[in-house]
């Protein structure tokens, strides 16, 4: 049993003012594994006050000092990689291939930011004016459960890189992950008040943070509906916003694709993190000329995916994060059938042989029209829609016909052709032929997938603002 009773304010683990508790479960077993004591608005006030006190000194730090902090944070995360993986597996059920990647990426986020700081021009000249890129003040950050510690690290890296201080409200159901990560970050010995973390719910702690007058910028990762509430809350005091939200990412299989390579990539992208990934390729666009062949391969390979114990390295699909989310995903599978789509594989209920744990069946719909809700809205589970196109131009049009624009995937044997298609897609990232993750590429989306970008100079730009000083000509 893990009972998390502390939050992190002004460089120390402290007992929150809030006293409500939230139960924590292992989604693979449905066992209660602990609870977290939640903070409240008073805790947010204390955390923001600490961050505000620490800001002037942090804003004055040199590049070298920020880089040194980022390197200490990287080393501190690497030192407890195994504990972070265990916390993510137990509290969330992410498959081993994903937890391993997450921890590696969490450490690399600090390294990437160190390089970005090194190369970033904080001092510039425009005309005859001297321009300085300045941090804004206290950053308020909010993270989701699907990659909680990775996003905490990303947002902290941006705060340090820009010379800001930060108050983070992590996903409350990820409290064990948050605790282990905080123990790591504490070892990096940041100046007091630079990092503050308050566990709590969105409507209480999230709302207190997004309305606090001393918070200058909100960096939010989560769903588009919650982001609308955050954006409204931020309006009053004109907070700057960086929003990384949902997606309905297209995977375009071009008619010359080598299916031996393309089908596993399409399924890996679609079922990434059991479908609980904002970047999941949840719409698979296939050419009519090869429809039957591709459908047969999608069905066969999906039915061979191993589902179950997330700690098993061969497992590709783990449980959904919680019972309410399992119910929601079941609702989407019912809705798809009511809308007239056909099940190629999967369907409602649990996979065969798994009678407990919040496991859903990997599901693929065909006969999906672009107007159906299953083709337009984010499901955030292992439920994919296959849409048939006649030619390349139609594939591009369908891919771009979305309220979202976070990520897109193109699969082809002809790389120049894939590039030509990629250049027509309105998405924050376009991945060609399963290219490996690039930790330096900007991350964020067009349209309702977000606002601004994270990572590298693009991420720093969003956390900084230019001040120009004009002097009389000599
Ligand atoms: P997810 O389903 O991925 O958790 P949400 O958008 O619901 O997506 O949650 C993402 C984060 O936003 C969580 O930390 C959640 O507590 C927080 N959140 C939810 N509602 C609000 C709100 N009204 N104000 C601020 N934060 C919120």
Image (tube, rainbow, N blue to C red):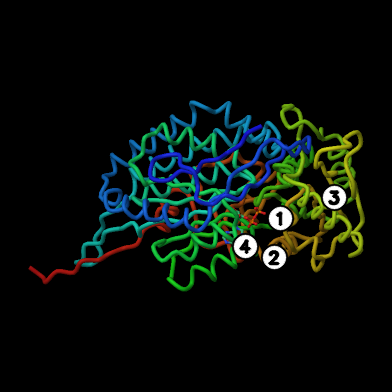
Please give left or right for residue 351 compared with residue 169 in the image: right
Pointer 1 or 4: first along the chain:
4
Residue 262 picture location, percent across and down:
75, 42
**Nearest to viewer (mark 3 / mark 4):** 4
Q: Which residue is mark 2?
A: 402
Count of number-bearing discs: 4
The response on whether ligand 1 sits within 8 Å of label 4 is: yes
Please give left or right for residue 217 compared with residue 206 in the image: left
* Marks 1,2: beta carbons within 8 A: yes
Which residue in the rendered view is the most extreme toward the left? 474
Q: Secondary structure at mark 2?
A: loop
Q: Examine the rendered structure and indicate whether residue 232 appears above or below residue 264.
A: below
Residue 88 falls in image quadrant: top right
Residue 64 picture location, percent across and down:
28, 39
Q: Give the CA distance from mark 1 to mark 4.
A: 23 Å
Q: Which residue is mark 1?
A: 250
**Nearest to viewer (mark 2 / mark 4):** 4
Please report the residue visible at 73 percent of the width from the left and 37 percent of the height from the top.
Answer: 32
Q: Secondary structure at mark 4?
A: helix
Q: Which residue is mark 3?
A: 364
Within 10 Å of disc 3 (Cα), the crowding (few <14, some 14-19, many 20+) is many
Q: Which residue is mark 4?
A: 226
Pointer 3 or 4: first along the chain:
4
């Amino acid at each position: 049993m893990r009972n998390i009773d502390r939050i992190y304010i002004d460089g120390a683990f402290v007992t929150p003012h809030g006293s409500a508790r939230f139960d924590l479960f292992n989604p693979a077993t449905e066992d209660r594994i602990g609870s977290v004591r939640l903070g409240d608005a008073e805790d947010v006030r204390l955390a923001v006050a600490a961050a505000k006190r620490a800001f002037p000194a942090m804003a004055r730090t040199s590049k070298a000092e920020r880089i040194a902090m980022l390197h200490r944070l990287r080393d501190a995360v690497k030192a407890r990689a195994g504990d972070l993986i265990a916390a993510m597996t137990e509290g969330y059920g992410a498959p081993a291939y994903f937890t391993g990647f997450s921890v590696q990426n969490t450490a690399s986020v600090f390294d990437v930011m160190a390089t970005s700081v090194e190369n970033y021009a904080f001092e510039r000249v425009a005309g005859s004016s001297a321009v300085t890129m300045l941090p804004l003040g206290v950053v308020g950050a909010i993270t989701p459960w699907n990659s909680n510690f990775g996003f905490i690290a990303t947002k902290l890296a941006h705060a340090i890189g820009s010379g800001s201080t930060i108050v983070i409200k992590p996903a409350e159901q990820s409290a064990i992950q948050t605790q282990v990560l905080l123990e790591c970050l504490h070892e990096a010995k940041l100046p007091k008040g630079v990092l503050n973390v308050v566990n709590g719910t969105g409507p209480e702690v999230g709302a207190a943070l997004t309305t606090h007058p001393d918070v200058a910028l909100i960096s939010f990762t989560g769903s588009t509906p919650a982001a609308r509430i955050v954006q409204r809350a931020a309006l009053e005091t004109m907070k700057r916003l960086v929003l990384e939200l949902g997606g309905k990412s297209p995977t375009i299989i071009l008619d010359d694709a080598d299916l031996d390579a393309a089908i596993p990539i399409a399924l890996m992208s679609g079922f990434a993190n059991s479908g609980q990934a904002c970047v999941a390729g949840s719409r698979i666009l296939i050419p009519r000329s090869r429809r039957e062949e591709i459908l047969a391969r999608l069905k066969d390979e999906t039915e061979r995916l191993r589902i179950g114990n997330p700690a098993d390295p061969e497992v590709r699909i783990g449980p959904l994060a919680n019972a309410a989310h399992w119910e929601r995903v079941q609702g989407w599978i019912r809705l798809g059938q009511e809308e007239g789509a056909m099940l190629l594989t999967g369907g409602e209920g649990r996979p065969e042989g798994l009678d407990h744990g919040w496991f859903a069946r990997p599901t693929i719909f065909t006969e999906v029209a672009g107007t159906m809700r299953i083709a337009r809205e984010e499901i955030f589970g292992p439920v994919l829609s296959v849409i048939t196109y006649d030619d390349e131009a139609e594939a591009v049009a369908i891919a771009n016909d979305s309220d979202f624009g976070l990520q897109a995937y193109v699969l082809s044997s002809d790389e120049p052709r894939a590039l030509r298609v990629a250049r027509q897609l309105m998405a924050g990232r376009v991945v060609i032929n399963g290219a490996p993750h690039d930790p330096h590429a900007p991350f964020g989306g067009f349209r309702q997938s977000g606002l601004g970008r994270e990572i590298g100079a693009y991420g720093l730009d969003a956390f900084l603002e230019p001040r120009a000083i004009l002097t009389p000509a000599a």
